[in-house]
Amino acid sequence: MRYLKILFVAFALILSAPASLAQNMQLRAGSSERILNGNEIDGVVRKAEWTMSLRLDGRHNCGASFISPKIESGKVTGWSSEASEPKWAVSAAHCMFDPWTGAPYEISRLSVYSGALDIQNGPSNGEGDVQEVRAFYVPDGTLGTPSYDPITLENDIALLRLADAKTVDGSKRGSIRLPTIADVNWIYDPYTALHTAGWGRTSEGGIGSPTLLEVRIPMVDHDTCAEKYAPFGDEIYPGMICAGYRSGEFDSCQGDSGGPLYYRPTPLTQLTSKSVLVGIVSWGRGCGGADLFGVYTRIVHYQDWMTAVIQAN
Ligand code: ARG
């Protein structure tokens, strides 16, 4: 979505990248053509049932995740990991604006498709469900959070209020919880093993994946990431985090924006019992390049804003 930057990267790669970079990436990536080396989600929606496709005019445009506030007497007191019919989603602010005109999309053009792994054949096979988007909210300078900046992509987060799904199938859709204060003590530390998932491009400049792909990447230390992006004039703000390997290769890409960066407990690293939403796919220079980590919106930075928006709506 950072078109200028993407163009610039293309130039930078053509003009200045050592010829071995592309070769190297190909060699190391082996024959896999998956989203920068992701895996299919095993045919089980249940593994990432909070992940959905945010559609523009009925076509996949971005990713998004279901969230579900726990509300007691009008106050948000926490975030549920098991809402089966969630009414809120979180995505990237840049997914809500026409990149050419900068105007927000008309709400009637937006919907979400969830509960299916295959966004191409799922709908005709009667899988999954479409929900209309009733309203969306991006940081606009109120509620204690500065505005979303389409140039720097600072504050790249959007909250979507959804209409009911037509079918009720609690086994296919579910919410992911946001970090608690206790999680924040470890979840944003460098090297935490995270996952990101989406239907985005499977190679830089390539095409999107019809099936949901997932890739595992480590959290990157903020200063390391900032240092790598500084030569491009890109700032890594406190509301941004980076994830990926120094060698690149495994990454999110165009079309994954708005989708989740999450921690999923495994039998070996069960630091919490339920998956936790850690970030939102936001931007990067190219995809999968060495030292060009994927940049994600740091969820915990926006949790008060999210609470305030939900309480007000
Ligand atoms: N901005 C992209 C989108 O709109 C996401 C890019 C993520 N890039 C990356 N290298 N991780 O889909």
Image (spheres, rainbow, N blue to C red):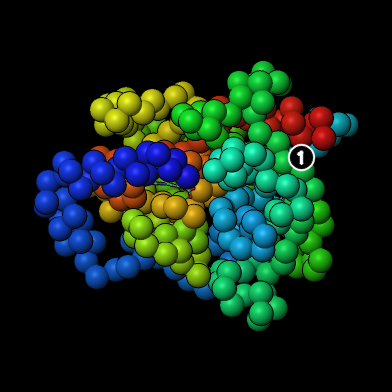
Give x and y (percent) for residue 60.
Answer: 58, 61
Instruction: From the viewer's side, name the closer residue of 103 and 163.
Output: 103
Q: For ligand 1, tell me if the residue under mark 1 lies within 8 Å.
A: no
Residue occupying the point 54% across, 50% down: 259
Residue at 64% across / 56% down in the picture?
Answer: 56
- Relative horizontal placement of residue 208, taking residue 292 as reference (left or right): right
Q: In the displayed orientation, state which residue is furthest to the top.
A: 144
Quadrant location of the C terminus in the rendered image: top right
Residue at coordinates 45% horizontally, 64% vertically from top-left? 208
Left or right of 180 in this view: 215:
left
Kindly tell me whether residue 177 is visible in this rendering: no
Q: Secondary structure at mark 1?
A: strand
The residue that label 1 is drawn on is 70
118 lies above or below 267: below
**Furthest-bottom residue in this view:** 125
Q: Residue furthest right?
A: 73
Q: Where is 137 relative to 197, above or below?
A: above
User: Residue 120, can we see it?
Assistant: yes
How many numbered discs sit on the rendered protein? Answer: 1
Q: Please tell me whether residue 180 is drawn above or below residue 144 in the rendered image.
A: below
Could you say where residue 4 lies in the image, as x and y percent from the top left? 40, 39
